[in-house]
Every structure is written in structure tokens, then in C-alpha cells.
Amino acid sequence: MARREEILRAAQNAFLKYGIDKITLDDIAKECGVKKTALYYYFKNKEEIMMEMILLRLSEFEMQVKEAVDEAENVREKLRTYMKMKINLMKENMPFIKLLDKEFLPTKVKGFMQLHKVRIMEADFCLVKEVILQGIENHKVSFKMSDSLVLMILGVTHGAFVGRYLEEANWNIDEMIDTTIEVIFNGIE
């Protein structure tokens, strides 16, 4: 692991410990086990550290989801895997998500977050659409491609996470995923 990446991983712990508003470069350096001047070798300021840290995490998540989806055997399992992976990754990173959601973010970081939120939504949309198109080509899905179908899958995935883990609803995530996939393949009677 490169030194820059090690610093970014340790910085995440520092941000979680001190909060975005209160953290200093000294706090980050201490958590990373380096001198503050060493941070300046890699980063201009704490905002740059935060943005690079977020970008590293998002890239890792995207890669994990894509690899898991690619390994799944059929369309149903690919969709199930996508939904389950996204929900689980968001759940595992709940402290980080809450930190970014509730803390004051510098304007530059807010813009950065918005840009990457859109990029992730587009990547998710393309991944799910690709899975469905593969199902149509392999005659496993018997309807025409519709963007609304992709949006339904994305909406259920995000909604399930928000309801179950952010709002603490007593929802059975596996049942929600199974029901969604069943509706996609068999419709509603």
C-alpha cells in the first residue's frame, strides 16, 4: 500500500474521531503517525485530504460491487448481488456516511461530494442497465428495456438502506430484495 493511501486510511479514523469541523492537520498527522510537514508533501490542506479520502472509498466500493456482480451467475443473482452489496457497503460505512451528512462541510468539499454523488448514480444506473440488457439478450428477461425499471431497482436499494438503517425501520432487507426481483421477473398480479 502506498504511503499516500495509508495516510488517507488513517485520516478517515481521525475525521471520525474529531469531526470535520474540529479536526486539525495536527490531529490527522498524529493519527497517521507522521509529522504535519509530511502531510504537506502529499496534500495541500485538510479539505484535499478529505476529498481524496472520499474518492478512495468510493472507488473501492464501486470496484467491489462491480466485481461481485460480474461473478454472479445469472440476471437474478446479479441484481440481488448488486442490491445486497450496495446496502451492506452503506451499512458498514454508516459512521462515515453520517459524518459527511451531518457535519459542516467546506464549500469545496460539498461541490466535490455533489459531483461524485452524480457520478456514482450514473455508474450504478449503467451497471444495473447492463445486467438487465444481458438478461434480455440471453432471453432471461422478457420485456423491453426501460429506464424506469433501472430506477425502480436503484430506488428500492437506496430506500431499503435509508429506511432500515438510517430511520431504523424494522424491515427485512432480504425480503425486500426478493420481492423486488420477483416483481421484475413475474410482474404484479
Image: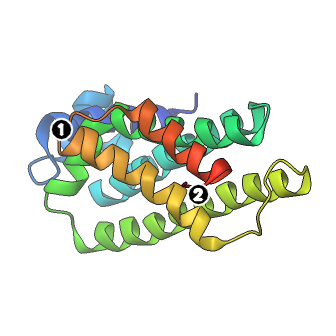
For the point 67% across and 33% down, the residue is 68
Say how the picture is coloured.
Answer: rainbow
| Disc 1 to disc 2, C-alpha distance | 24 Å
Q: Name the residue nearer the viewer: 162 or 117.
A: 162
Whether residue 28 is visible here, answered yes or no, is: no
Residue type, label 1: Glu
Is 143 above or below relative to 26? below
Q: Nearer the viewer, residue 2 or 103?
A: 103
- Left or right of 64? Residue 175 is left
Q: Is residue 117 left or right of residue 188?
A: left
Q: In the image, what residue occupies the spot 14% across and 62% down?
A: 104
Amino acid type at circle 2 is: Asp
Please provide percent x and percent y for residue 184: 62, 52
Residue 64 shows in this picture: yes
- Sequence-first tag of 1 and 2: 2
Query: Mark 1 highlights which residue?
Result: 168
Secondary structure under the numbered disc 2 in the rendered image: helix
Residue count near mark 2 (Cα–Cα under 10 Å), binned few <14, some 14–19, many ≥20: many
Name which residue lies at 17% across and 51% down: 20
Q: Is residue 38 left or right of residue 67?
A: left
The residue identified by callout 2 is: 124
At numbered mark 1, what does the secondary structure look like: helix, strand or loop? Answer: loop
Q: Residue farthest to the left?
A: 22
User: Where residue 178 sits in the image (x, y, percent)?
Assistant: 52, 36
